[in-house]
Image (tube, coloured by chain):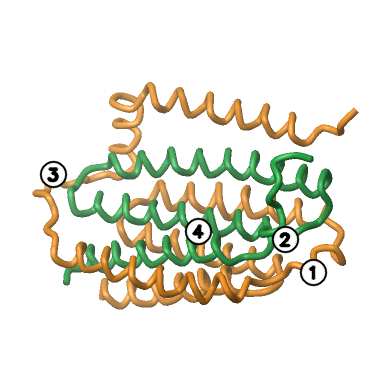
Amino acid sequence: MEWVIFGVLAFWLLVSVLGAVLVKNPVHSILFFLSSVLAMAGLFLSLGAELLAGLQIIIYAVAIVVFYVLVITTIPWEKVKRFEGVYKKELLFGIPVVLVIFLLMGSMVLRGRFAQPVGVVEDNVREVGRTLFTSYLFPFEVASVILLVAMIGAILLGRKEE
Amino acid sequence: MTLEKAYILLSILVFLIGLLGVIARKNLITMLVSTEIMLNGVNLTLVAVDKVLGRVDGQIFSFFTLTVAAAEVAVGLGLVVAIFRLRGYEGSSEIVHLRD
C-alpha cells in the first residue's frame, strides 16, 4: 500500500517538475510548480511529517507562488515573448551530465546502508516543537534575522533610482 | 531496495531536474522557479532520512530551508525586476556585464 501511494505521488511530482522546467509560458511553468508543491506536501504526509506538509502548503503554495504571479503581471508581456522556453544547446549538453550525476549518486545510495535508528517519533508536531525550542533555539532566532535582512534588501532593490 | 531509498532516489532526480532548469531556461523568473525545485528536492531527502532514523532534526533543517527559500524569492525577484528596469528585457545568457 505504501508503495502504491509513493508511486502515484512520485509520478505526479516528476511530471509536474518536468513540466515546470520544460514548458514555454512562464505562468504555466509556475502553475506546474504549484502542482509539484502539492505533490511534495503529499509525500511529506506519507513520510509522517504533518507539520512540514502544512507549512509547505502555507509558505510555498500560498505565499511564494502568489508572489511570482504578481511579479509576472508587472512585466510587459510582449517583451518577455522573445525569451520563452529553453536554450536547445544547453539542454542537449545538460541532459547527459545530469544523467551521469544521477547514476553515480543513485548507485551510491543503493549500495550504502543507513545509520542505526535511534528511536520512534510518537507525536510529530509535539516532538518538532520541543526540539525546535530547545536544541535549535539560536538558529531559530537567527532565521528571523535572515527574514529581516531579506525584507530590507527587497525594499532597497525595489526603490526607484533618483 | 527499501522504500526510504526510493524516496532518496526521487529527491535526487527532482534536484537534478531543477539543476537542468537553471542551466537551460531562457527567462530569469523561471530560473528562480527551478531553484525552488532544487530546494524542494533537498527537503525531501532530509525528511526521508528522518523517517529512517526516528528523529526530527531533518524536519527542523527543512524549516530553515523554507525560511531561506522565502528570503531568496523576495531578494531574487527584486533583483530580476531591477535588472529588467536597468538593462531592458534580456534572456538569461545575454546578461554578462556587471555594470555599464
- The percent position of residue A103, horizontal first and vertical second, equals 28, 71
Of badges 2 and 4, nearer the viewer stands 2
Where on the picture, by quarter, is residue B8?
A: bottom left
Name above or below for residue B15 compared with residue A60.
below
Q: Are marks 3 and 2 in contact (CB under 8 Å)?
A: no
Is disc 3 placed on a helix, strand or loop? loop
Find chain B in the image and tell me its colour.
Answer: green
Residue holding disc 1:
A82
Q: Which kind of residue does numbered mark 2 sit on?
A: Gly
Q: Which residue is mark 3?
A: A119
Looking at the image, which residue is at 51% across and 39% down? B68
> Which element carries disc 4, helix, strand or loop?
helix
Q: Which residue is mark 2?
A: B91
Amino acid type of the residue tagged 1 in the rendering: Arg
Residue B75 visible, this angle:
yes
**Residue drawn at (39%, 26%), measured in percent from left and top?**
A139
| Image disc number at residue A127 | none
Residue B98, position in %: x, y? 69, 41
Residue at left offset 44%, top offset 59%: A41
Q: Dividing the image into 4 quarters, which one contains the N terminus of chain A?
A: bottom left
Do the residues bearing badges 2 and 1 touch, measured as CB atoms within 8 Å?
Answer: yes
